[in-house]
Each structure stands twice: as structure tokens, then as C-alpha cells.
Image: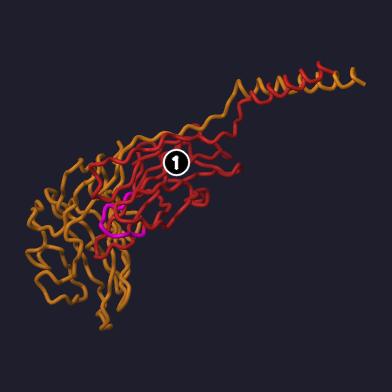
Amino acid sequence: MKKTLIAILLAVVLTVVPAASAFAANPVIVTVTATPAAVSVSVDFATWTVNGLTGDSKMRENTTYYSNPLGDETAPSATVANGDCRFQFTNDGNVAIDITCNFADFTGGDAMTNSNGGYTVNGANTFGASGYESGKDWPTDAVIFKNSGSAIFISNLAISATNKWGIALLTQSAPFVSTTGMTSTITCAAVEHVP
Amino acid sequence: MKWLVVLIVVAGLLLAGCPQPSELPTAEATTPPAELYDKTWISPGKVEVGNFYPGARAEYMLSIHNGSDEPAEFSVSYQLPNSTAEGYEAAPAAAESWIIIADPAPVLAAKETRDVLIAVEMPGDAQAPPKWEFWIVAKDVTQTGMVQTELACRWLVTMK
């Protein structure tokens, strides 16, 4: 009986040892690495009433509005100046960042939807929007604000750096019929800049 | 009989010594930067996963800091990248179901920092490009105003 038990145990050990060696020779190790870095961004003057900087706060159809303190229908300078810009990003984190902005469809009232074609492309019930950045050329450097998946708007904003910017918005071509106000949100995502 | 005991102990030690391929990969937690106490931030900015394969799991803690003087609710969500790092492509459509966010709606007290576990668990029969990227986005949903901000952490995954 004892001999039988010893034989069984030896067989078990001999079976297990090669398997263990195989595990040791080819370990499957997934690596996870991350460098401590804080991503943070703030925006000054985050509110904007379209046609409300110098106008009567009412949108007209087929009209291009700008978040330009110099005038709601005043395009920015050929080289965008700080004075053309209502908003300002500040990189509050400790790593350089890229910023992308998505412009959601309007809800309420006539509920315009985003054409995703930029500030020159509208439709009966669609609007177009683009962002402009201080120091860049207008309109060649304007970046389309889609309702999702927009391209990078501000690239490689350094730690503690600020950047002024604005929005151009072309309203829908069909007349507005609702007297109820519409609202929308522009969500700007900051992400660590990588090459 | 003593030999039997010895053999059992030896067999046990051999088995215990086997490296286990299913060990979860982990990385050190990040240290919140003290100078950003009054700012809302996330950390880290990017997580790099290497040697990944179908059936594997990787996880990391996303730290979220509420720099405001008021409590704030955050949304933590998966997002396809608006832009990708060089050499990477956007995650496949199915990847959204591979992501586990332990707490997708944390409510943080003023100045609180909270760690939220993020895991990616790829099914054994799934496929992905050699190098793919997705974002985990944290947004303070108590923000008001037409322009709002959110903070994204890049996950850069390289397959085995």
C-alpha cells in the first residue's frame, strides 16, 4: 500500500515539474506604466449669449455670429488678435496639453443641429461652427467644431500658458419659428500632449 | 510514512513556486501635486499598456481632484480619442464593452482627491490593432455656461 502511494506521488510530481518549468520559461506579463502628471485646464468667460455681446441676444437665420467682444457680427482680424477673443484657456496642470472642442446640437426651440462642416456650412435646420485662436490666421487656420470627434484645436499648450480664442457660428438657413430659447454646450477636452 | 509526508511537502512547494500567468499587472499610484490643490485635475495623463493580448486584463487608478470650494459630481466615461498618439489608431468599436469603470459618477467633496479604478478586460476571442488608443474622460457635471471643460487620460495599448 505504502509503495503504491509513493509511486502515485512520484508520478504526480514528475507530471507537475515540467509544467511548472514551462510557465517559468514563458511568463505572460502585461506591463502597465504611467508617469505622474496632472492634466488640468480652465477657461475664462465660459458664458456666451449668441448675438448678446453687443446685439440684442436674438439669433437671426443664415447669419454668422462671432464671440468677438468688438461686435457679434464682426469677423476676427486676418491675424487673430487677443481683442477678437472672448475666451481664454489656461493650462493649470504640470504637463503640456492638446485641446479639442465639440459643439453639441442645440436643444429647445428650433433645435438646430450641427452640420459638422464648420462656420460656412449650414442647412435648413443645421448650423456650422468653427474656433479661431489668437495669433493664427483667419479664416485659414479656423478649426471645425463638430458635435463629436473634432480635430485638435489648440496643440501643445505649455504648462501655465494661456491662449485666447473665439467661436464663429453660422445659423440655420430656414427662418426660426419658435419663440423658445435654444441652448447648447461646447465641451473642450484637455489631454496630455504626445508626439 | 515519513517519506510520504516529505513527498507531499516537496510537491506542495513545487506547485506553490510556479509563476502564475494570470497575475494582474499593476503600477504605482501617482502622487497628487500639492501646488494644484485649488485646481481640478486628473492624473495620470496617459497610461501605457504593453504586451497585451486577448484574454488579458490591465488596470490602473485614475485620480480625480475637485479643486473647487463646493462638492461636485463627476462623470467618468470611455471615449474614442479625438486625436491619437503617433503610431496608434482609435480603439475598435467593441472596445467600449471591454472597459470597466469602478465608479462612473463619483461625488467629490471640496478639495477631495478620489481614485477610480479603470480596467480593460479584453475577451479571449476579440481582436484589436497592434497599437490602439482610447480615452477615459472625467467631467465636472456641475459646470454651467456654454463653454465647459473635461479632462482626458490617454490609454495607449500595445498588443503582444
Q: Main secondary structure of the magenta part?
A: loop
Q: Secondary structure at mark 1?
A: strand
Which quadrant of the rendered structure holds the N terminus of chain A? Answer: top right
Say what amino acid the circle numbered 1 marks: Tyr
- From which residue to which does the magenta span run? B65-73
The x, y position of residue A186, in whole percent, is 27, 61
Q: Is residue B133 left or right of residue A147?
A: right
* Residue A20, quarter of the rendered image: top right
Q: Is residue A74 magenta?
A: no
Outermost residue, front side: B2
Taking the spot 18% from the left edge, 77% from the top edge, the residue there is A58
Taking the spot 16% from the left edge, 75% from the top edge, the residue there is A57
- Chain identity for the colour red used in the image: B
- Residue A110 drawn above or below residue B18: below
- Chain identity for the colour orange used in the image: A
Taking the spot 9% from the left edge, 63% from the top edge, the residue there is A69
Location of mark 1 (residue): B60
The x, y position of residue A75, in whole percent, is 11, 62
